[in-house]
Image: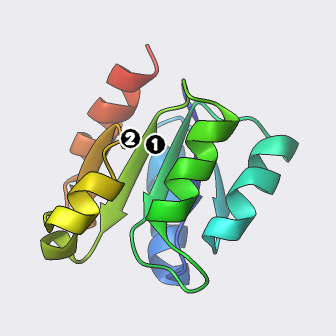
């Protein structure tokens, strides 16, 4: 199973995501901001990273590029409750390094399938 890091400032969503993915057998660590992603990766390497698009203190754009600079082979999936933002030209270009993009309401099976595909 995969080692997952999720960065999301919504504590309820983060907790639900962690619990759901752990139920599927994955090991999951959660942080509440993009600034905590690289330190978390240094403490506990991950096979895949999930990033919320909009977070206080910086969201997916800057964090995605920092993770890619740290490890270009590490898959990063962006998640959002605001898919219209992700589809805008600015975000489309800025998020081009993302391995996948999901709305937060996607079925858990979609997340799990993508994790398995990207970490094979």
Q: Helix or strand or loop: what does disc 1 sit on? A: strand
Residue 85 at x, y percent in the picture: 20, 74
Q: Residues within 10 Å of mark 1 (few under 14, many from 20)?
A: many
Q: Helix or strand or loop: what does disc 2 sit on? A: loop
* Quarter of the image where the N terminus is located: top right
> Residue at position x 28%, y 31% from top?
113
Residue that sits furthest to the bottom in the current view: 56
Seen in the image, is 75 located left or right of residue 98? right
Seen in the image, is 59 located left or right of residue 30? left
| Residue 4 image-quadrant placement | top right
Residue 87 at x, y percent in the picture: 13, 63
Residue that label 2 marks: 97
Q: Earlier in the sequence, mark 1 or mark 2?
A: 1
7, 89: nearer the viewer:
89
Residue that label 1 marks: 76
* Quarter of the image where the C terminus is located: top left
Q: Are marks 1 and 2 in contact (CB under 8 Å)?
A: yes
Seen in the image, is 24 located left or right of residue 5? left
107, 66: nearer the viewer:
66
> Residue at position x 51%, y 52% from top?
64
């Amino acid at each position: 199973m995969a080692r997952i890091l999720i960065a999301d400032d919504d504590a309820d969503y983060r907790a639900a995501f962690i619990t759901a993915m752990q139920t599927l057998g994955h090991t999951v660590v959660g942080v509440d901001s993009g600034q905590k992603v690289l330190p978390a990766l240094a403490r506990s390497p991950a096979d895949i990273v999930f990033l919320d698009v909009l977070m206080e203190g910086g969201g997916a754009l800057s964090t995605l590029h920092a993770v890619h600079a740290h490890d270009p082979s590490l898959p990063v999936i962006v998640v959002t409750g605001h898919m219209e933002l992700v589809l805008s030209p600015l975000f489309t270009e800025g998020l081009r390094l993302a391995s996948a993009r999901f709305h937060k309401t996607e079925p858990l099976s979609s997340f799990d399938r993508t994790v398995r595909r990207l970490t094979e």
